Image: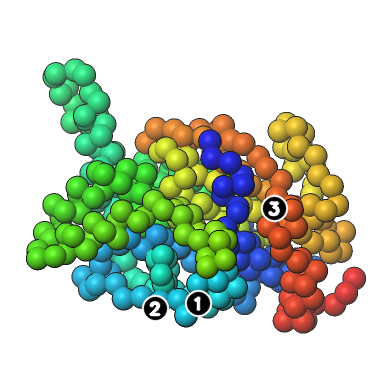
Amino acid sequence: MISKKTLLNNELIKEVISIRVNTLWKMLSLEQRGELPSVNEEGATGKYDNKGAIFIPGGLIFQDVDEKNIEYTSYLEKTAHAFRGEVRAAMLHDNAILLYPDGIASGINLDGGFFSKAARRIYTFKKAAFRRKKKIGSSAYFEVNSLDIIRSHCPTFITHPYGSRTRISTNIAACLIEPALYFAFCRTELNFCGNQSGTFTEAFDAVRDSVRSAEGLMLYTPHIVVCHDTRYSENSYTGLTRILGIGKFGEFCTFTLEKVNKKLLRELKRKNKEYSPEDFFAEYCGRRILGILRIYAPTNPGKRSTNYRLHLVSPVKDLGINTDQIAKEAREQYHIKNK
C-alpha cells in the first residue's frame, strides 16, 4: 500500500486539510447550538469549501461536457504559496478543478456519461481478457457496471444512491488506474483528427508525474482528490475527503476530522495507535479532534474490502500547518466565542 508520507507530503493536500480545519471550527460551533448537519445532509462545509471540489490531473481530460478544448490559466509564479492560493480560489467554483504542470483550470463541467462508459468498458474488457473458459455461459459474467466500480472505491458507510461528485470522481479514478486502456478508449471514442492525438498523448504522458514548485516542494501528486460536502459518518465533523487512483483497483484513502470518543478509541486500540496532545487539530467545549487517515486495500469490482490501515495525522509534524492561526481566523469569521 501507498505510504502516509506520499499521500500527505504535497501542497494540495496540505491546503485542502487547512481549509477543512477552518470548516471544523464552524461545525464545532454549530454542534454547540444543536445545528450540526446530519450525517447524510449536505452543508458540512465552511467559507472556503462550500462548493466541495474534485481535483484531477488535467492530462486525463481531453474536452469538457460541451466538447470544447480545456483552457487553463498559467501560474503567475510556480511557488508553493502561490499554488495554495490558486487552490483556495478554485474551490470557490462548482465542478472540477484540473491541475497541470504549468497551470490550473477551475469550474470545468465534465461529461459524467463519458467517464462512466470508459470505466465500465475498461473493466468489462479486462475481466473478459482474463477469462480462461472458452464457452461464454452467461453474458452477465462479463458485465461490470458503474455501481460496482463506485462501491469498490467508497467506505461502506457511503451507500447507493451515489451523488454526482462521487460518481464522476470514481469513474475518472478508475481510468487513471488503467491508463493504457483508458487512452485506447479515448482514441476510439473521440475520433481524434489532425494533431489532436499527438496533443492529447503529450498531456496524457504527464499525468503520472508529480509536480514540484520552483523551490522544489511537491505541489501535487498524480491522484484525484475529492472534497465532499457531507459528513457521512457520525464521528466526523467536516465533509469527507477521499484520495483516489493511488494504486490498484479499489485502493483509496479517506481523511476525516473526528472527535475522541469511545468509538474512535476502540478503533485506535484495534489498530495499535496512540495519540498525544500534539495530534489534536482542535479542542473546544470538551471536544478533542484528531485527523484520521484510512488507507483501504485493493479489491475486485463490486466488492469492498474491510481491510484498511489507519494513521493518525499530526497537524505540525505531517502537514506543517498552524492550527492556532487557523482557529483564530475561523473564530472571527464564524463569530465563535471562547469557551
Crowding at label 1, few (<14), some or many (≥20) Cα neighbours within 10 Å? few
Q: Amino acid at mark 1?
A: Glu
User: Is residue 227 visible to us here?
Assistant: no
Residue 250 to residue 328: above or below: above
Q: Quadrant of residue 68?
A: bottom left
SS at mark 2 in the image: strand
Tell which tag, 1 or 2, sits nearer the viewer: 1
Query: Can you see residue 293?
Result: yes
Separation of disc 1 and disc 2 at Cα?
11 Å
Whether residue 92 is situated above or below residue 170 in the rendered picture: below
Residue on which the image places disc 1: 77
Tell me the CA gap for discs 2 and 3. 30 Å
User: Which amino acid type is marked by label 3?
Assistant: Asp
Q: Which residue is mark 3?
A: 318
Q: Quadrant of residue 164?
A: bottom left
Separation (CA) of disc 1 from disc 3? 25 Å
Q: Nearer the viewer, residue 3 or 299?
A: 3
Q: Position of residue 88 (x, y in %)?
A: 56, 74
Residue at image location 67% in from the left, 69% down from the top: 23
Q: Position of residue 70 (x, y in %)?
A: 29, 72
Q: Which residue is mark 2?
A: 73
Amino acid type for the residue under numbered disc 2: Thr
Q: Quadrant of the C terminus?
A: bottom right
Residue located at (28% from left, 69% from top): 64
Mark 1 secondary-structure assignment:
loop
Mark 3 or mark 2, which is nearer the start of the sequence?
2
